Image (tube, rainbow, N blue to C red):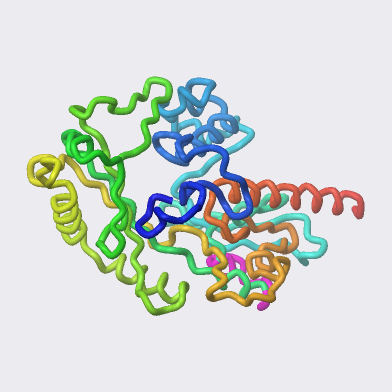
Amino acid sequence: MGYPGFKGMTIASRHHREEAEGEGGEEPYIFHFPDGNASIARLLVRSLVPGSAPGSSMEDIVTAKMNYAKLDHASSPVRIRLNSTAVNVKNVGEPVNGQEVEVNYLLGGKLYKVRGASSILACYNCIVPYLCPEISQNQKEALAYAVKQPLVYVNVQVRNWKAFQKLGVSGIYAPGSYFSSTTLDFPVSMGSYKFPSSPEEPCVLHLLRTPCKPGLTAKEQFKAGRYELLSTSFETFERKIREQLGRMLAGGGFDSARDIQAITVNRWPHGYAYEYNPLFEPQDRPASERPCVLGRKPFGRISIANSDSDGHAYTNTAIDQAYRAVQEIISTNKAFSKSA
């Protein structure tokens, strides 16, 4: 596994981020877009909204410039309205036989109202009871059960990566340190985007911190970590970054004052979806009774998605839940058409 204490054990090597629960791990963890899941979202938008981005392949989407003026155009079959925060969603009439859903949202300080045949709430599932207060108390409790894991993703641009080459490492895991891992990104070139192949070239390091409070349950730790995250200044992050990189990479000639060119701290207070941990969850509870399953049940013409609805923090589960929610809407519309 590559971690201390495992060298003498006869365990097949497998990357810790390789696959979601229950799936095989035949491919190494190197197949991804340089900007992560952002390119997946951009590919979806380009397919749904004609003219929103140039190109036709996954190679050219990475550096493609989005045309934001096209996203909410009246002529488009799909319209994406940015900077619009939904504050209330409800079935028009009784949920069992209603024909429409009403959505209230804020845009530019003004409240707007729209209606449609159906709606999918694909937000953080804990928010759903506040957006849709008419759902049952049992479903509200199921939706509120999950607590997202807070995370800090830091990108540090450095003058070069010669220190990593000299030390013979591509990543450093430091349990107990402020940042638990520091890694060079995988060497991904896609289309006109090229990775820095020479150690003399500037590159971006990825640092990870999971704020927590050892000794508490997982959900209690996530809440404590969120509070810590929201009360930590950028100056504190910068100092910790410079100190830790300086200690770890000094043997390779790295100097924080000289070699760090830029720092971006991405605070993610509501980060990864809550995953069911056997240390803290009932052992005899069937999968069909997990809160994520009970919470995602459709309510009239309103369906619920997001990776929270699956209990796994992975892109493929988010896509699976989106597909499931759309199928629910199709089935609901067919049922109402037959009864009309």
Q: Nearer the viewer, residue 192 or 108?
A: 192
Q: Is residue 154 visible?
A: yes
| Residue drawn 69% across the image and 76% down it | 284
| Residue drawn 12% across the image and 47% down it | 250
Q: Where on the picture, by quarter, is residue 213?
A: bottom left
Q: Position of residue 203 (x, y in %)?
A: 25, 34
Q: Is residue 37 above or below residue 5?
A: above
Q: Position of residue 5 (x, y in %)?
A: 38, 60
Q: Is residue 44 above or below residue 82?
A: above
Left or right placement of residue 300 versus residue 151 in this view: right
| Residue 300 within the segment the image draws in magenta | no
| Residue drawn 46% across the image and 72% down it | 218
Q: Position of residue 147 (x, y in %)?
A: 49, 69
Query: For the magenta stretch, what is the residue range?
Result: 126-138
| Residue 132 within the segment the image draws in magenta | yes
Q: Is residue 292 above or below residue 105?
A: below
Q: Is residue 23 above or below residue 203?
A: below
Q: Where on the picture, by quarter, is residue 240?
A: bottom left
User: Farthest residue toward the right?
Assistant: 339
Q: Is residue 266 visible?
A: no
